[in-house]
Image: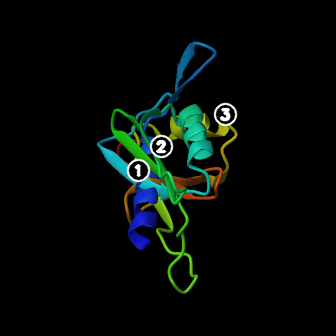
Amino acid sequence: MVLKRSLLVLGFIAILSSLAWAQEGQEMTAGFEVVGETFVAVQVPDAQASAEWYQRVLGLEEVKRLDAEDGRFSIRILARTGLTVELIRTNTAVDVSGTPRGLFKAGFYVDDIGAAFRWLNSQQVETDEGIFSDEALSVRTFVFRDPDGNRLQVFAKLSEN
């Protein structure tokens, strides 16, 4: 179960990497790109609803869909250059003791953190406070949440932003 939850969180990060979306035939880009290749899988309560959010907000495209005939799981894999997000809904989202398991948050680097912050806010995405600098790690960063409350953290090297 821990592995499945970890895969979901990784899928989540992957979705964040493709930050462009299309609406009514008009393509719009987020104005920033994820730096490097990123994969994240995230455990979610509704794979299809989460996939639709990631497609709309981050411009990811669905590349694979898996649904167990017995309803045990649903998986949506979304991607864009540099980012792959796997969204997983399972009937076993907790360990045998009933305790939730998985990653606390996942993160990725972008080329322009200000543009990323503005884009997410324009999409009414919940962010924790604003962009702040972490001198010890030499980064600027902020945290945002998907509709299921999963935390995603965006980073940019101080020397680049």
| Residue 1 badge | none
- At a point 54% along the width and 34% down the height, the residue shown is 55
Looking at the image, residue 146 sits to the left or right of residue 77; the answer is right
Instruction: List the single residue furthest toward the front.
Output: 70
* Residue with the mark numbered 3: 122
Q: Is residue 155 visible?
A: no
Q: CA distance from mark 1 to mark 2?
A: 8 Å
Q: How many marks?
A: 3
- At a point 52% along the width and 38% down the height, the residue shown is 116
- Tell me where residue 16 appears, x and y as whole percent: 47, 43
- At a point 64% along the width and 58% down the height, the residue shown is 149
Q: CA distance from mark 3 to mark 2?
A: 15 Å
Is 79 located above or below residue 5 in the figure? above
- Tell me where residue 18 appears, x and y as whole percent: 44, 35
| Residue 16 badge | 2
| Residue 108 badge | 1
Asked whether the residues under the numbered discs 1 and 2 touch, taking CB atoms below 8 Å apart as contact, a structural biologist would say: yes
**Amino acid at pointer 2:** Leu
Structure colour scheme: rainbow
